[in-house]
Amino acid sequence: MWYVMLVAVIVAGVSMQVAFGEEAVEKKKIKLFILSGQSNMVGSGDSTQLPERLRKGNDRVLMFEGGKWQPLRPFKKADERQKERLGMTDCTFGPEIAFGDEMAKAWPDETIGIVKQAWGGTGVLAWHPNWSKEQADRTNDGEKGPLFKVLTGKVRKACESADCEIMGFVWMQGGADMKEVPLGKEYLSNLKAVVEGVRKETGVPDLPFVLGSYRPDGMPDDLTGIDVSKYPDLKRPGGVYVLQAQYEAQMELAPAKMVPLRDLETHPRNVHFNTAGQLELGKLFAQAYLELVEGQAAKESESAGEE
């Protein structure tokens, strides 16, 4: 009889711990950041190369996965291709790990939350709020379904699970839209639809937007009037249009900031960032975000003073 009582006590204790954990998250105020995009947002960083504190995570930097808030950490198992070509043995990660860590440093007394939805090799039309299979199939993404609904649905569930303040939207995407000139020329209008859609769905009309943009050595941020033939790395026909659109997005989607990506480490003979590259990418996104919001705060303060 005693062991039955002991088991009952243990089970009750576990139940209380689970309930307490869920209740604690519900009562937490979380500064939530939305991350989305394609392969370098999905990430090919190697979890085994991370320090233990980033590999295991903690209760102050969270991610919303599996329908619940939990410590931010690498969780996506390396696929067979990554195991074979890159020698990975455990989990992969993207810029969220370093980004979350930097945000925690910026707000040492706050809880940081990451909601990430990303899919490699995917065009911006797959995230368009007015999604159609026909349009998404222009980049062979029709079978993936309306990713805008997936992204915003995940954010909505995350906010239902805790007291969230939505702080920013970080975007790493564009390669799939460089394949054709018409797609490249439409990129800015399609990206605007995504960002404005996220701002509308979240109810934050001035949600800060940060995006990454590749820049080969020597290429300026503003590509107006440049001779693209000077940049052999820019091989895709629509590439120059996408890169210029990402630069112009800073003005068109203000408050927004483009992060020019130069010299980030990649895997050998590969366009995907390795562990060091992903950690640097996350830090660059964090730095850009903080500079953006500090600049916005300064402008608002200046305007208030003039009044």
Image: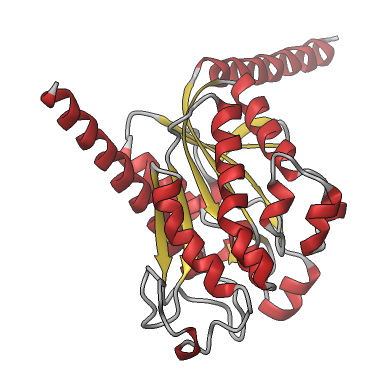
Image height check: is 84 above or below 174? below
The structure residue drawn at horizontal position 37% and vertical position 46%, both measured from the top left corner, is: 289
Image height check: is 200 above or below 187? above
Q: Position of residue 223 (x, y in %)?
A: 41, 72
The structure residue drawn at horizontal position 67% and vertical position 16%, both measured from the top left corner, is: 13
The structure residue drawn at horizontal position 77% and vertical position 73%, both measured from the top left corner, is: 81
Q: Position of residue 285 (x, y in %)?
A: 42, 54
Viewer-nearest residue: 45 or 179? 179
Colour style of the rendered protein structure: secondary structure
The structure residue drawn at horizontal position 42% and vertical position 77%, both measured from the top left corner, is: 263
Quarter of the image holding residue 19? top right
Q: Position of residue 141 (x, y in %)?
A: 80, 57
| Residue placed furthest toward the front | 225
Q: Is residue 149 visible?
A: yes
Quarter of the image holding residue 88? bottom right
User: How many marks do you count on the picture?
Assistant: 0
- Locate residue 274 relative to residue 77 in the image: left or right: left
Image height check: is 132 above or below 10? below
Quadrant in the picture for the N terminus: top right
- Locate residue 82 relative to residue 248 in the image: left or right: right
Quadrant in the picture for the C terminus: top left
